[in-house]
Amino acid sequence: MGMGTQLYHTADMVRALPEDGNRFEVVYGEMLVTPAPTVWHEVVQRRLLVALDQYLGTKAIGARGPDLAPRRGGRGILTPAVGAVPASLT
């Protein structure tokens, strides 16, 4: 029995997928599929965002990004739940 060829997924391939409620990410050509965030995930995310805002409000080191779009890196595309950028980029 022959071995199948493994497909190397690209960021463009992920963007072309229809919205079905799942989260699609690619790391080193491998597609990762996770279900949409749960309510508990949203609660924890909101708490992290509030804490990050409070911390960054006292320091001039950066800013929290609002609803971050999927990020394309050197080897994939990821969708962060929480993120911040350095002050030099704000």
Image (tube, rainbow, N blue to C red):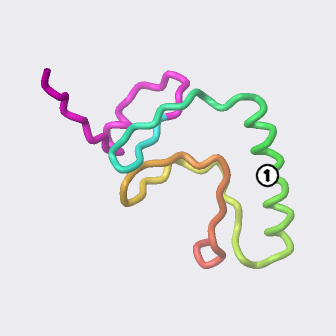
- Residue 69, image x, y percentages: 54, 48
Q: Is residue 41 left or right of residue 78?
A: right
- Residue 39, image x, y percentages: 76, 29
At 83% across and 67% down in the image, what residue appears? Answer: 55
At 63% across and 73% down in the image, what residue appears? Answer: 86
Instruction: Identify the image quadrant of residue 38.
Output: top right
Q: Magenta residues?
A: 1-23
Instruction: Identify the image quadrant of residue 44.
Output: top right
At 84% across and 57% down in the image, what residue appears? Answer: 51
> Is residue 51 or residue 31 the one in the foreground?
31
At 54% across and 46% down in the image, what residue appears? Answer: 79
- Residue 60, image x, y percentages: 76, 78
Q: Is residue 56 magenta?
A: no
Q: Amino acid under label 1?
A: Leu
> Is residue 69 or residue 29 the one in the foreground?
29
Q: Is residue 6 magenta?
A: yes
> Is residue 7 or residue 16 the one in the foreground?
7
Q: Is residue 47 left or right of residue 37?
A: right
